[in-house]
Amino acid sequence: MERYTMRRSILMFFLIIIPIISTSFSEEQNWNKGWQYRLTVEVTLSKDTAPVEKVALINFFGKAGKEDGSDIRVFDKTGNEVPVWVVSVLKDDRYQIVFPVEKELYYVYYGNPQATSPQYKWMPQRGLTLEVYKRVGRYVEDWGRVKDVIKQSKERGLLGRSFWEKVWDGTNPFESEKDTVRIYEGYFYLFSPDKLVFATSSAGPSYIFINDNLIAYWEGWHRAEPYVRPGRTGEVFLEKGLHKFTYYHIGRPTQEISVAAIKDKNEQFIVIQPNFFLPISKASITKLESYKNSITGGFEWENTNYLKKEEWELITFKFKDKSFPPQDIKKRSWSFGDGQKAEGKEVTHTYLKEGIYPVSLEVKDKNGNTNKVTLNVFVRQDYKQTRITSLSTKKYIQEFEMFNLNKFNTDLLFNLAGIYKSYGMNSEALKVYLVLDKKTLNENEKRRVLIESASLACKTGDYDYAEQVYIKLLSKKTEPYIQLKLASLYLKKREFEKAEPEFLKIIETETCSQEDKRRASIGIGDIWRAKGDYDKALNIYREALISENIGIKSGSFGQTVISTLRAKNFNSAYEKLVQWAQEIPVAKLEGNWSVLLARAYMLNKEYKKAVDELEVLIRVVGERDNIYIPVALYLAGESYENLGNKEKAKRYYQIIIEKHPSSAIVSQTYKKLEGLR
């Protein structure tokens, strides 16, 4: 009995283990040796009855062994190879392929750098494709010249190619290039002889060919029109069978529209619809495998958000895990190629610069098995999308705060610092420059970092740090630009005894430019202004004037600043105020400039700086009659309220009531005082 039981156990062991061994051996034996990856593709055959070879199309993200995708192979489930056309190979690891289908299951192999190019030359005769080339040549008055442009453009190289829905476009979907040649080629089938009428509507020259015969055209450079004229149409009688459609469009900036139309049963022209062309069978990827691995990492991506801000771009991508088998994956670790990392099944990341980034995904299953895949991602705006929105400022800033600054390279750190500055986030920009200061930089970069960080330190109130930087720079080389910065810093700190000698050094140095000397003179005037000496400041400012019609120009500056303040754009307002004061320094004594500068500071919640400027104006104007003083007093009161100093706020409001009782803001002032009681 025991012997029987033992035999039975051994038999059961072999019954269990043999299928496992057999399956593993079979899978390895059926693997197309030399290829790293295999996709399982399920096809739903199109239901049309045209006697034309059916084809399926897939887009996939992966690491082919050859740059041109020539190692990609397709097999049916019985192991027979079928021809494949690699439609597009983009600058990153994305591919579009099409292949003939008769069955429902196929295998796509890729990732073999040793593979030789296939010998067959197969092309599909279904659907519609679009090819775009950089245009070479500009003479397009007739078909003969257009042919030369097309020939030269094709020789220069392809910008992009893809299967397409219809000829109904207004831009280059592959990149920003607008000087283009677009070629659409498709196939349609007639089940009985028929007369068809085609038309073209375009901006720039366009031509429709049927079976390589010219049918309709619109020659020369021109704008688009929202209707079809008879001269741009053509009719053709076609026999039963397969026919080829070709559309050529030559484009340049503002002349990028291309539309191909056909007459419908109601004798009306309509845009040729996708169902006019022979359909492509639907195909879906159901499995991703890598040779001898229990799990396989894979992912796809898309550009979801885009913002062009000044000279910077913020390009947000969404990455989706497509690893297999999905139910076994327990951990997903991402590296975005720019030093930043994340975890999760679906993650987003904003890039600070266009370029190709090696993005990695490492996956781990419950048993600790891992697999890592690295794909090149071409980070740029997706031109296929007619409109792509940006994220909110808040969301961008939240993401920036999560960045590991030490992992960025110098280019990206410079970009991030510039972006922070454009948002008026000076403290954050300074942090980035302090990280840059620890990097290995060339002399020009080092100098730039020091100057920028000192300037930002001045804006954030870290005057001691800024002073150290300027003194360090001047110890290496005497530069009027840096001397002006240092002298202006002392002026801000109200260290007039240090500021004046620095300004005088520039004025007395023969090698300094006249503009540097003029700026230093204005600095001396600013010292007298800060001390409250109106007359001395006025005399110096007048000598430094370089503008005529200063009243008109000051009015223009003022209106521009008011507009930018209404738009809540602090940086632009501040830059314009600085330019105004440099060109017309006497504006600093007239009141309007100081009031607007204070408003700018208050917009940026820099209430201490607002108070400092307003109190300088109030002190230097003194008892003079100046229409802006009541406003300056009111803004000083508001600023002190925001600083939490109610007593000083009350004092300024009371001065308005006592000394300027006829001012237009007296009623508002009473309300302010009521609120402070």
Image (cartoon, rainbow, N blue to C red):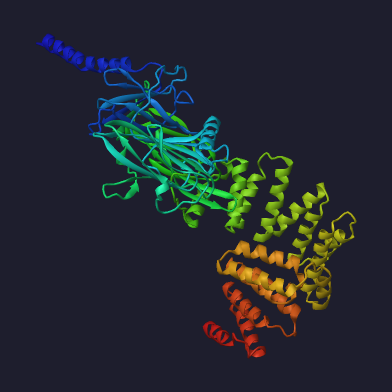
* Residue 259 makes an appearance in the image: no
In the rendered image, the vertical position of residue 268 relative to residue 133, given as above or below: below
Residue 183 in the figure: left or right of residue 491: left
Residue 171 in the figure: left or right of residue 483: left
Tell me what residue is drawn at x 89 percent, y 57 percent: 509
In the rendered image, the vertical position of residue 161 relative to residue 218, given as above or below: above
Q: Please name whichever residue, 186 or 193, is drawn nearer the observer in this view of the structure.
A: 193
Residue 555 in the figure: left or right of residue 119: right
Q: Please name whichever residue, 101 or 350, is drawn nearer the observer in this view of the structure.
A: 101
Residue 190 in the figure: left or right of residue 289: left
Q: Position of residue 226 (x, y in %)?
A: 41, 54
In the rendered image, the vertical position of residue 158 relative to residue 291, given as above or below: below
Tell me what residue is drawn at x 44 percent, y 51 percent: 387
Q: Please name whichever residue, 266 or 65, is drawn nearer the observer in this view of the structure.
A: 266
In the rendered image, the vertical position of residue 296 relative to residue 17, given as above or below: below
Q: Position of residue 146 (x, y in %)?
A: 52, 37
Residue 111 lies in quadrant: top left
Tell me what residue is drawn at x 58 percent, y 76 percent: 641
Q: Residue furthest top?
A: 3
